[in-house]
Image (spheres, rainbow, N blue to C red):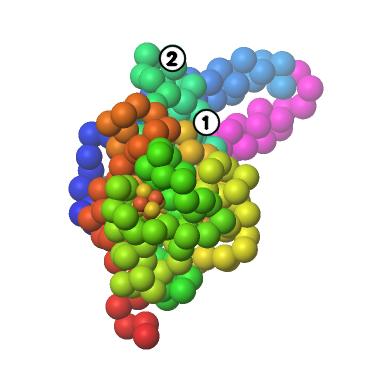
Amino acid sequence: MTLDVKPKKRLFIGLLVFTCLILFVFIFLLWYVPMVGLKNIHPSFPLFYTSILAVFAVLMLSGGLLLVFTIFMGKDIFLSQKLRGIVAKVLFPFMILMGRLVGVSRERVQQSFIELNNHLVLSNHHRTRPNKLLILLPHCIQDFDCQVKITGNIRNCKGCGKCEIKDLIELSDQYQVKIAVATGGTLARRIIVDNRPEAIVAVACELDLTSGIQDTYPIPVIGILNERPNGPCINTKVDIQKVKQAMLDFLDPHAS
Ligand code: SF4
């Protein structure tokens, strides 16, 4: 997978810069307003208070710069694993809020987050053995009229070829990788607990991918958006080549 800075990621970075600017103004006000009052309580309080706010501002600035450099350079400079957690748990909810403020839809921010997450995962060069890699698929990829129950055991698929489940099973067989189908977040969590993967290639819509990436942290997840030519949640598709590339990005070429 190429580590280029695509427009979707730029959206997240833009919102991040905007958030930083707002936070700096906020920190300034937090510093300026109580300064007069603190002086009256004790002469050393203003210095103490300024130091705390300065440390916070420096941490925020260094974190933001580290994130931007990691994205642009495409490699793990420092703490990219931790950065991924901060992006997923802290920054993403902020970015949704900021996006709403400047008129960017939730879906676009989610797409941007997924790309940014993939980028950070790739920067970190996570490698694992095939039996520790899981391909997790949404149920809506199965042909709507298919009577076979593949949740619980995807191997029930008869391989008729009406949907991409057949190709995805073949891909998992070729590389000896685990594969499963989930109908929602609860089942996805159970599959992850049962299989204990060290890395996941997940296919889903924006909403399920973002919540999945957040929930499964620190397990590295490469998220691939499904295609929805028939509308959401019915007969969805996925680019098999993207799934294969994501798998290869995770697989250790030297592992037996
Ligand atoms: S490929 Fe498998 S899951 Fe898809 S329609 Fe055929 S039997 Fe059903």
Q: Which of the 4 quarters of the picture holds residue 32?
A: top right
Q: Is residue 228 above or below residue 237?
A: above
Q: Earlier in the sequence, mark 1 or mark 2?
A: 1
Residue 8 included in the magenta stretch of the image: no
Element under disc 1: helix
Residue 62: x and y in percent read 43, 44
Q: Is residue 52 left or right of residue 200?
A: right
Q: Amino acid at mark 2?
A: Leu
Q: Residue at x 45, y 28 (%)?
A: 95
Q: Residue at x 56, y 50 (%)?
A: 188
Looking at the rendered structure, which numbered label has been put on residue 117? none
Residue nearest the viewer, comparing 222 with 49: 222
Residue 190: x and y in percent read 63, 54
Mark 1, ligand 1, within 8 Å: the answer is no
Distance of label 1 from label 2 (alpha carbons):
13 Å
Residue 204: x and y in percent read 41, 42
Q: Residue at x 44, y 17 (%)?
A: 100
Q: Residue furthest right?
A: 41
Q: Which of the 4 quarters of the picture holds residue 116?
A: top left
Q: Which of the 4 quarters of the picture holds residue 46?
A: top right
**Start-end of magenta stretch:** 40-56
Please state the total of marks drawn on the protein image. 2
- Dot 1 corresponds to which residue? 93
Residue 148 shows up from this direction: yes
Q: Is residue 9 above or below residue 150?
A: above
Tell me the quadrant of the picture where the C terminus can be found. Answer: bottom left
Q: Residues within 10 Å of mark 2 (few under 14, many from 20)?
A: few
Element under disc 2: helix
Residue nearest the viewer, comparing 26 with 77: 77
- Dot 2 corresponds to which residue? 101
